[in-house]
Each structure stands twice: as C-alpha cells, then as structure tokens.
Image (spheres, rainbow, N blue to C red):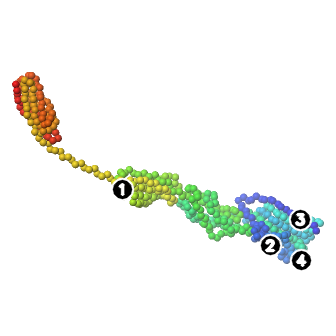
Amino acid sequence: MKRLAITALTLLLAPAAAQAGTYDVVACNAAAGGTNNAWALETNDASHIEGFALCPSAGTRSGLLVTDRLTTAGAGGGSYGQWVIHSPAGTTITRIRLDRYLNMDGGTGWRLYGRQADGTTLAGETCTVQPGFDDCTVSGAIDRAVNTSSIAYGFDCPTGCITGATIHSASAAIYSATVTISDPTAPTVGAPSGALVGGGFHKGTESVTFNGVDALGLKARRLVIDEQTVAEEALACDYTRMVPCANPGAAVTLGVDLNALADGTHAVQVAVVDAAGNETRSNPATIVVDHTGPGAPALTVSARPADDPRFTVSWSSPGGQVAPIAMAHWRLCSPSGCTGGTTSGTSVSGTLAGYGTHTLHVALEDAAGNRGEEAVVALPHLAPAPPSPTPTATPTPTPVDPRLRVTTATLDRSARTLTTSGTAAGSGTVTVRVRYRVNDRQRSRTVKATLRGGRFSARVRLSRTDARRARSARVSVSYGGDAGHRAASVQRTVKLRR
C-alpha cells in the first residue's frame, strides 16, 4: 500500500497590532498535564463521526482526535467533524503553533482541512490522494501567522462518504496546540482612593484602594509611582482557557513605604493589567512626600545681665524644607530638671528658676509632622555680687586753739634787725607782718616762719634809714591752722632798742 505524506514546518509570524496585547492559549501536549479547556469537538453527524480528547497524546490516534465511526455505512453530504477553537469577542487569533495529524483513505469521499473562520483552508492543511496511493497524510509541526476568529481541524463530506470497516477512512488529530490571541482592548481602571492619594504631606507607609475590569479578566493590579511599579497583586489565570482570568469582585489595597522616595513631588497612578498584558493606568495624582525633619535652628539669645533670671531666645529656620515649619518644641533644663512646651512662633521667653547654668533646647517640626534635631544654648544665671561694705566715716576732729603767742618783738636799731619769735601748738607756717612809720609814712614788711616744735622765729632786715627812724612799730602774726588747730592771729608792739 502506498501512502503520500505531507509534512510542513512553517514560520510566518505577523507583526503584533499596535497597542494590542497578546496571550497564548495552550492545550494537550503544550499544557501541563495535557489539559484542554479551549478546543471543542463539533460534529453534525454523531452517527458517522466521533471524537476523543486523548491528551497527553501517545501515538497516531490520540490527542484531540476526530474520526469516522467504523462500520456505520456511508455518511451523507454535508457531514463534518472537527476540533475548533474560537477567540473571545473583540479578539483575534494571530498565530498558531500546532503538532497535528491529518489522514484520509482514497476513494472514500472525505475532505481534510485546517480552516479559518471564513471557511478558507490554510495553505498546506489538506491533502489529496494521488493516483497509485491508498491515502494521504499531513503531519508534523506548524507555526503559522493568521488573522481569524477561529481555527478548526477536521474533515467534511461534500457529497456522500464511506466510513471504514476496520480502518478509519478519515482522521484528524491535534497533539499539541499553542494559539496566540490578540486583544486590542485595554482594561478599565477605577478611580483610586485612600491616604496615598489624599491631600497634605505624605510619609511612611501609605496605601491606595482601587479595582478594574476587563472582558478577559485581570491578571494584575499595580501601584505605580513616577512610572515605576512599586507594588503589585498578581491574580490567578489559567491559560488553557480562552478567557484566562477573572475579574476580582473586591477592590484591592496596595501599600508602599514612602521613605524609599526622595522628598518632593511624585506622580501616583494605579493600574490594571488584562490577560493579554494590556495595562491601563489612572490619571496621575501628584503628591508631596516629606519624611525628613528640619535642620537645627540658629538660636539667638537677647542680651541680659548674667544675674537677671529673665531671658528671651529667638531662632531662624535653616531652610531647604519641603513642608513649612509648623511649630517649635522647646525644653528648658536646670540642674534640678526640665520643663518644656511648644510654640508656633519664633521665640520663647521665661524666667530662670534658681542659680546655675540652664540650657534651652529647641527642635523644629514641619507641617508633615517631621521633628528635626535640637539646637542648644546655655543660659547662665549667677547670684548677684554681695554689696560693698559702707566705710565708717572717720570723724573730723574739731580744730582747737593753737594758742598762738608772740614772745619776742624787738627792733635792734644798731643791728637794723627786727626779731619776732613766739609759740603755737600747730604745724606749718605763720605769717609775720611788721608795720611801722617813718617820717609820718606807713611802712610794712612780711615774712614767713616755720613752726618747729611749737616755736617760730622770724627776722626782718631794715634799711639803715628805716632802722634809725622807725616809730610806732607793731608786729602781727597770723596762723592758717591745720587738721587739728584752727586759724589764729595775734599782735604785739615792737620793743625798740638803740
């Protein structure tokens, strides 16, 4: 018996449609455990045609098999049997990778095929029994680009056909199948909600809640920040089925640790991905992340005496903050403990309790709730110096009478000398003044004499004429006083000698 075998291995891959995702549906030997959930057996003549799902395949008559029924006499025109796969609504089959087996005996009237939805037979997917041969066969692997909504492998009877008695007249089997589905429709994503897309400043771990839907179901729900996926929920899908995934009924909540992001603005999106890998993202929500506390403030102490317990300390913000400064935390510490508080201003005033060195600690907090490092300033409070002792005034002694006396007042005419001497209890000098008349004219001479041991002596030298003619001579002695003696004066007539 002669047989004609046609084996084809075709690699004709069409480019993927723009913006369309794809997924592969596997069956029989291409699927784990030889599963088939995508191909369906169809026949309009179960009396003459039968089929079996014998996967994993082993041998010629196994796999997804359709064949004529033995010993059933002839089948009428229009009978057919096939294994067929249909793409979901709105999608297209763009590629098939099959390991198949088609066989037909000559003279039986059957027609083998691998067909598309429009009824056209794929090139090379049929055969004709040639003269001198008993049958024809198409077998082996095929990798083919297509553009259709269904693929069917089987046979039909155009006008009337003979079924086999002990050997099947027509058979079609698929041992392994990988069918690529192109889905141009993106899924729909719902609006996100939750703390992450709320107002204000953001830090730490925050989350967002959302959902989506697609005709093919969803295989993932994602959280995207600045075009990077930061959290994802993978959903179970079964790619042995034409609709591989389901639409989750409940919304998902995805969280992210924002401490991994730099301070500043970021774009947040949620996304859903369908079975074909089409992703739809929500409109970006701009958030402001701030998880860094302010730097230490610069403290300024208002001038104050060190023994004044009152103080005022002001500060300025260091700058460079994303969130504005909201408040300041302060602690005033002394050797006996600390007190503290908060203020929305830029200064704090108070009174130091007790003497010693106090310290004021100030830390700033921004509107995002981040508290920064402390700045510290010393506030000494010294005890006042004791008052200087008031000096006791030494009583000033009351001056006493110096007991000024002139004991001698003599004019020696021949010696032309007027001598005056006397006593006084004080110290210092006395002024001796001599007055006399010469020819009716008043004359005077004045000298100083020092007190030594309570005595003084003064000599006045006169001219020869004055010494000879002086009349009515008197001497007056005056004393200006000292610390213990009052001023005094005394007069005496001068005794004249020849």
Q: Which residue is mark 4?
A: 71
Q: Position of residue 184 (x, y in %)?
A: 71, 62
Marks 4/2: CA–CA distance: 22 Å
Q: Position of residue 493 (x, y in %)?
A: 5, 31
Mark 2 secondary-structure assignment: strand
Which amino acid, by three-letter code, is at mark 4? Thr
Give the crowd class for mark 2: few <14, some 14-19, many >=20 residues within 10 Å: many
User: Quick one: 353 or 130, which is closer to the camera?
Assistant: 353
**Mark 2 or 1, which is nearer the eye?**
1
Dot 3 or dot 4, earlier in sequence: 3
Check if mark 2's residue and mark 1's residue have beta carbons within 8 Å. Answer: no
Q: Which residue is mark 2?
A: 53
Quadrant containing the C terminus in the rendered view: top left
* Quadrant in the rendering for residue 255: bottom right
Give the crowd class for mark 3: few <14, some 14-19, many >=20 residues within 10 Å: some
Q: Position of residue 172 (x, y in %)?
A: 84, 69
Q: Which residue is mark 3?
A: 5
Which amino acid, by three-letter code, is at mark 1? Tyr
Q: Residue at x 6, y 30 (%)?
A: 494
Check if mark 3's residue and mark 4's residue have beta carbons within 8 Å. Answer: no
Mark 4 secondary-structure assignment: loop
Which amino acid, by three-letter code, is at mark 2? Ala
Query: In the image, is residue 300 above or below residue 454?
Result: below
Dot 4 or dot 2, earlier in sequence: 2
Check if mark 3's residue and mark 2's residue have beta carbons within 8 Å. Answer: no
Q: Residue furthest right?
A: 132
Q: Position of residue 58 (x, y in %)?
A: 82, 70
Dot 3 or dot 2, earlier in sequence: 3
Q: Which residue is mark 1?
A: 355
Q: Residue at x 8, y 22 (%)?
A: 465
